[in-house]
Image (cartoon, grey):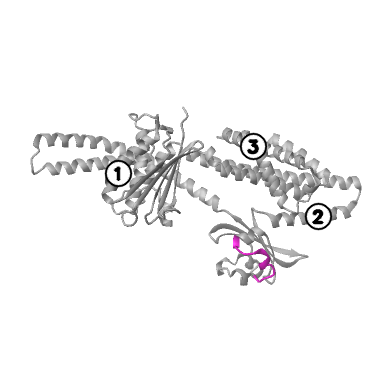
Amino acid sequence: MKNRIRKHLTRLAPELAAKTYGFLSDHNRISALVLEDRSYTLSRLETFILSLIEYIHTGDRVKVEKGAREIAIHRSKQGISLACVLERIRMCRDTLLDQMEQDAHYFIFTEEERLELYQIRLDLYQFVDSLIDMFIHIFETEESQREKEMQTGTATRERFSEVAEQELVQLVLQSTDIAVLIIDRNLRIVEANYSFAELQQVERQQIIGTHIDETFRPRENERFVQWVIERGQSGHYVAEINGTLTTVSTSPIYHRGELWGAISVLRNITDAKRYEEELTKREALAAVGQLAAGMAHEIRNPLTSIKGFIQLLREQTETRQNTSYFSVILTEIERIDGLLNDVLVLARYRDDKIAAERFVIMDEVLGVIRLLEPESNRRGIRLELNWSGDEWYIYGYRARIKQAVLNILKNAMEAIATKGSIVEVSVYASINQVVLTVEDDGPGLEDKVLKNLFVPFYTTKPDGTGLGLSTTQRIILDHGGEIFAENSLRLGGARFEVRLPISNG
């Protein structure tokens, strides 16, 4: 996976450098760009981006740190401000992270790789943070050395402290990673950075100088920064602010032993919390899946014997009165066997009798549509297919893919039982993937349903098992694909999208 990331991003390095340069140009305070040659700056940005890409691939910190150290010393001697240099580093990092997120479908073929990409991005973020610390240290060291050489004494050091303080204030105000709020002892907002304003969904200029309680009216048990002034109580808390899970750290501000105000630092932890919950859910499902596979396998053996003896009894003792009884028993046995099959798929059980092969996916899609056409005609449902006629091969288990497509289409037809009459199937190719979408004009999916759609045994149907869509998701993931569900903006009902990698031979 790391090799795929390196190859893809290396090709885009010049484009990423140009994009970073464009972001920097939009920041008027980065005046150093005006003094430099554009081609020289682009070259330096591209070199740094390439070094970060190489770090993603090899994990070699030493090489990147050596190059970054040389840049830091050179920039410091040139007189380029620390804020300017740090802005460039962050912009390179953010541009690279955004591109990785945008092009994630090039790298991810399994759910495990999705988690691996998340870890790679987190590692890159932390590594660049360590580079920033190194740059700050080098700039301070170089400045200190210049002070000794120029023998400017205390006055120069004080001037540097003032400049560094101003640069630090600017960095905090422009930070996209943390939100900062400062109030005075009268609970009036003295300063708030743009991240805080965005978190609170307000305009920064409109809240400066206002009383914090009048501006936000927080709940009594969440007046964290106020408590520093009112109770002398600082601390660390977790709160949900406008739907965002946030950590809040508060501290007092003293000047010459007197309390002047309080500062609050807030950080968004929604993604980290979601990742932790997803990991816990996966571990639980893995344990349940292993148990279910064992039970399903053991149940299947006596079930096969029961089915065989029922068929034998039917042949030997069938009469007009008991014919229907035998039919019901065999039908229910088939139903149990189908449920066991779904459980085994969820548990990733591999049947040795089913072999993986390279096949045309449209053969299975068309087969499912032909299978469902009689029912759709009987119910007055218009089953439409949008397809160019092209053939795309995929590699995997033909029967499993057919089962997944059948589950999605049957789910759509059941969804429009009370409202709607159209189920639209579209199939097309997107770079290296086959994309299958199924949309309907039914009632759509509620937020609660969307959240639990692929959870095993979750169902909204009175007679449903809750295994259809979870089984479908497992099949698609096992084939290196992805499946998404949302509401259709065009038809108004539900929309399912399946992406599977194309097999080129």
Q: Is residue 108 visible?
A: yes
Q: At numbered mark 3, what does the secondary structure look like: helix, strand or loop?
A: helix
The residue that mark 3 highlights is: 53
Q: At numbered mark 2, what does the secondary structure look like: helix, strand or loop?
A: helix
The residue that mark 2 highlights is: 163
**Seen in the image, is 173 located left or right of residue 117?**
right
Q: Is residue 291 visible?
A: no
Magenta segment boundaries in residue numbering: 199-211
Which percent across, then down, holds residue 86? 73, 47
Q: Nearer the viewer, residue 374 or 217?
A: 374
**Seen in the image, is 20 located left or right of residue 430?**
right
Q: Earlier in the sequence, mark 3 or mark 1?
A: 3
Q: Nearer the viewer, residue 430 or 60?
A: 430
Q: Any magenta on residue 229? A: no
Quarter of the figure with residue 158:
bottom right
Label 1 neighbour load within 10 Å: few <14, some 14-19, many 20+: some
State the separation of the CA atoms marked 3 and 2.
33 Å
**Seen in the image, is 365 located left or right of residue 489?**
left
Q: Earlier in the sequence, mark 3 or mark 2?
A: 3
Q: Is residue 477 above or below residue 241?
A: above
Q: Is residue 122 above or below residue 460?
A: above
Give the residue type that dot 3 points to.
Ile
